[in-house]
């Protein structure tokens, strides 16, 4: 998040201010955001992570207030009186550092527990759902910040053009991306809940859809009786959850059967880009926001994709509930810079446009590729996809194959087993099955063993005018960094 003038809540008024926090797994997006928020409040923050320090140290933009020490170093807890240890859910609770802290009587909490306690004094706008959490939370924070409300922001992504991901601000409102995994969001205390939609996911935790829905209902019920649930009625599960919570419900939709909906220009009048070039006009969308049978605002959205129209509507409604007039919120969202790794244009290489996206669920993959088609008409779309988790890939196998078939060519990497135990061979076999399914249905797909092979494939088959879209929650974004390094080396030569 952008920190306006590096302004922070005065330390004597900040939640849990001037403490020492020791973060285990600080390289993850959630932990990194928490580190920035703690540092913004004036706390001393120390962290360690199992990945290479260089991969995240430079991204921790907290004014030099975050110290990073080697992974699995044995800390001397006597150096930090009243230190609090927080660990990512990606870190085993049996980790030796955590065990050593407990033996020494040091407080140990999970990230959701620590975040919930830290934000308890603040009014929380919590954004949850299978898709769109990061972008919607970022949009709400952006509108409130631009309107001068100085909100805190805990968002699992960076605003484009700014390396920070969280801020404490100096108001009393917080915007919180709220994760359903292991029911983490139940540690929060929302005043307003935003549900962007619910689909099957996190198969390594939820036994079935009903178990996930019950968690969402409990989350919505954590809001006060006079709170509100803003829900996307395009998702049947989300609207059922909202109504089951017995809280006031405000619905929104891309269609007409809701409290708020949009009117999109017809295909013939959208000013559609037919050149195939990613001009500034091609990235913008216009739509009318309607409520109670009338148009209440015209919205100019500077990022592409119908899914982002839906995200923007949720953000404008949430802002209006904080006292910002709808027209003003619509005006402010027109300057939203976007979120990194959400259809982020990473430049060009050898005449090829490079797009990076975090999509790792079939619905998100399809939305990303459809957005690429609309943004770059009449151009060849090459997809690079790293499946995330064995359980997700197996349970949504057919949906993944259908979504990836939207690309003209798809390069599939071995499954990243994140939080699961699986051999390299089994990860590769499952990815190979996905490739076969795509080709059997008439698509064009290749199994590639690693990121280096992706670069080789692009050298072989990529041609000027193509669009390469990398997708996944793992390492596919690193492909762009290597292509840019090669471009710089070629230019120097």
Image (cartoon, rainbow, N blue to C red):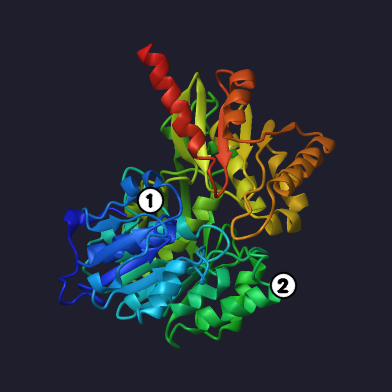
Q: Nearer the viewer, residue 268 or 478?
A: 478
Vertical order, 120 against 27 (above or below):
below
Q: Which residue is mark 2?
A: 208
Q: Quadrant of the N terminus?
A: bottom left
For label 2, the crowd category at 10 Å Cα-Cα, with few meaning under 14, some 14 to 19 and many 20 or more, is few
Locate residue 382, reporting x and y percent.
62, 31
Q: Is residue 91 left or right of residue 401?
A: left
Q: Nearer the viewer, residue 471 or 133?
A: 471
Vertical order, 306 against 113 (above or below):
above
Q: Is residue 362 left or right of residue 121?
A: right
Disc 2 secondary structure class = loop
Q: CA distance from mark 2 to mark 1?
A: 32 Å
Vertical order, 224 against 458 (above or below):
below
Locate residue 406, reporting x and y percent.
69, 38
Disc 1 secondary structure class = loop
Locate residue 189, reporting x and y percent.
41, 80
Locate residue 103, reporting x and y percent.
40, 79
For marks 2 and 1 on the same chain, the one whose residue lies earlier in the sequence: 1
Quarter of the image where one finds residue 409:
top right
Q: Quadrant of the C terminus?
A: top left
For label 1, the crowd category at 10 Å Cα-Cα, with few meaning under 14, some 14 to 19 and many 20 or more, is many
Residues at badges 2 and 1 in contact (C-beta under 8 Å)? no
Quarter of the image where one finds residue 76:
bottom left
Using the rendered image of the protein, determine whether residue 397 is visible from the camera's viewpoint.
Answer: yes
Q: Nearer the viewer, residue 407 or 484?
A: 484
Q: Residue at x 83, y 38 (%)?
A: 441
Q: Nearer the viewer, residue 134 or 243?
A: 134
- Residue 158, numbered label: 1
């Amino acid at each position: 998040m952008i920190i306006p003038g590096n302004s922070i809540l005065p330390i004597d008024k900040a939640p849990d201010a001037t403490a020492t926090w020791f973060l285990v797994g600080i390289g993850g997006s959630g932990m990194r955001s928490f580190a920035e928020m703690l540092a913004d409040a004036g706390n001393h923050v120390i962290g360690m992570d199992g990945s290479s320090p260089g991969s995240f140290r430079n991204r921790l933009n907290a004014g030099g207030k975050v110290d990073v020490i080697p992974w699995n170093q044995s800390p001397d807890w006597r150096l930090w009186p009243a230190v609090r240890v927080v660990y990512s859910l990606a870190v085993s609770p049996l980790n030796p550092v955590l065990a050593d802290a407990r033996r020494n009587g040091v407080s140990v909490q999970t990230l959701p527990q620590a975040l919930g306690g830290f934000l308890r004094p603040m009014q929380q706008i919590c954004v949850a759902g299978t898709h769109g959490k990061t972008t919607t939370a970022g949009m709400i924070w952006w509108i409130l910040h631009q309107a001068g409300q100085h909100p805190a922001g805990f968002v699992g992504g960076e605003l484009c053009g700014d390396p920070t991901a969280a801020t404490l601000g100096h108001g009393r409102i917080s915007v919180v991306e709220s994760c359903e995994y292991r029911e983490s969001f139940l540690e929060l205390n929302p005043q307003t809940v935003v549900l962007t939609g619910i689909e099957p996911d996190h198969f390594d935790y939820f036994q079935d859809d009903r178990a996930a829905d019950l968690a969402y209902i409990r989350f919505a019920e954590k809001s006060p009786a006079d709170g509100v649930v803003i829900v996307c009625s395009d998702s049947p599960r989300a609207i059922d959850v909202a109504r089951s919570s017995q809280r006031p419900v405000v619905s929104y939709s891309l269609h007409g059967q809701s409290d708020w909906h949009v009117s999109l220009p017809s295909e013939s009048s959208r000013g559609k880009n037919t050149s195939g070039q990613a001009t500034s006009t091609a990235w913008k969308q216009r739509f009318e926001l309607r409520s109670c049978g009338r148009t209440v605002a015209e919205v100019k959205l500077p990022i592409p994709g119908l899914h982002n129209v839906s995200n923007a509507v949720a953000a404008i409604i949430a802002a209006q509930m904080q006292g910002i007039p709808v027209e003003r919120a619509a005006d402010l969202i027109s300057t939203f810079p976007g979120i990194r790794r959400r259809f982020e244009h990473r430049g060009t290489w050898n005449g090829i446009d490079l797009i990076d996206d975090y999509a790792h669920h079939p619905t998100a993959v399809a939305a990303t590729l459809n957005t690429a088609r609309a943004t770059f008409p009449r151009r060849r779309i090459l997809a690079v996809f790293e499946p995330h988790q064995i359980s997700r890939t197996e349970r949504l196998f057919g949906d993944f194959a259908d979504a990836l078939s939207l690309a003209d060519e798809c390069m599939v990497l071995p499954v990243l087993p994140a939080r699961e135990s699986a051999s390299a061979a089994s990860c590769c076999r499952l990815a190979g099955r996905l490739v076969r399914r795509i080709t059997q249905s008439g698509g064009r797909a290749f199994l590639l063993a690693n990121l280096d092979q992706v670069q080789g494939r692009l050298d072989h088959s990529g041609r000027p005018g193509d669009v390469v879209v990398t997708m996944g929650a793992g390492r596919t974004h690193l492909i762009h960094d290597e292509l840019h390094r090669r471009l710089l080396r070629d230019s120097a030569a």
